[in-house]
Image: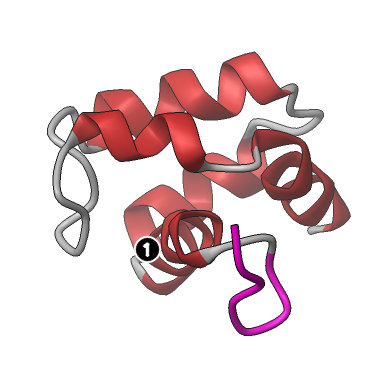
C-alpha cells in the first residue's frame, strides 16, 4: 500500500473524504462518537453499500485502515 494525501492509502482517504464533505454523513460521524473500527465500517457500508462513488465496489472497504478513520472521526 502507498500513502495517499497523508492517509494510509487511497481507500482510507476516500472514505474519510466522502463522510466529511457531505452534510448527512458528517452529522452522523459527529453524533456517533466514540467510534470503533467496526462501527465506522458499518456506518459507511450502510450509507454506500456498493462502495463510495469513487470506489470500484464494496471490496475496497477491505483496504481501508478503519483504525485511522476512527482516530480522525473521534477527534471531531
In magenta stretch: residue 5: yes
The residue most toward the bottom is 5
Q: Is residue 56 above or below residue 10?
A: above
Q: Is residue 51 above or below residue 23?
A: above
In magenta stretch: residue 63: no
Q: Position of residue 51 (x, y in %)?
A: 21, 41
Q: Position of residue 49 (x, y in %)?
A: 18, 28
Q: In this picture, which residue range is highlighted in magenta?
A: 1-7
- Who's the residue at 34% across and 66% down the image? 22
Of 37 and 62, the residue lying toward us: 62
- Who's the residue at 14% across and 59% down the image? 53
Residue position for label 1: 18
Report the magenta stretch's main SS: loop
- Who's the residue at 44% across and 56% down the image? 11
Which image quadrant: the C terminus?
bottom right
The residue most toward the front is 1
Q: Position of residue 9 (x, y in %)?
A: 57, 62
In the visual, does 47 lie left or right of 8?
left
In the visual, does 55 lie left or right of 16?
left
Of 18 and 2, the residue lying toward us: 2
| Number of marks present in the image shown | 1
Amino acid at each position: 500500500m502507498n500513502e495517499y494525501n497523508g492517509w494510509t492509502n487511497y481507500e482510507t482517504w476516500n472514505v474519510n473524504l466522502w463522510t466529511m464533505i457531505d452534510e448527512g454523513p458528517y452529522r452522523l460521524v459527529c453524533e456517533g462518537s466514540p467510534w470503533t473500527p467496526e462501527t465506522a465500517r458499518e456506518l459507511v457500508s450502510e450509507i454506500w453499500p456498493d462502495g463510495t462513488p469513487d470506489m470500484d465496489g464494496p471490496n475496497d472497504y477491505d483496504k481501508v485502515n478503519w483504525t485511522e478513520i476512527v482516530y480522525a472521526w473521534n477527534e471531531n
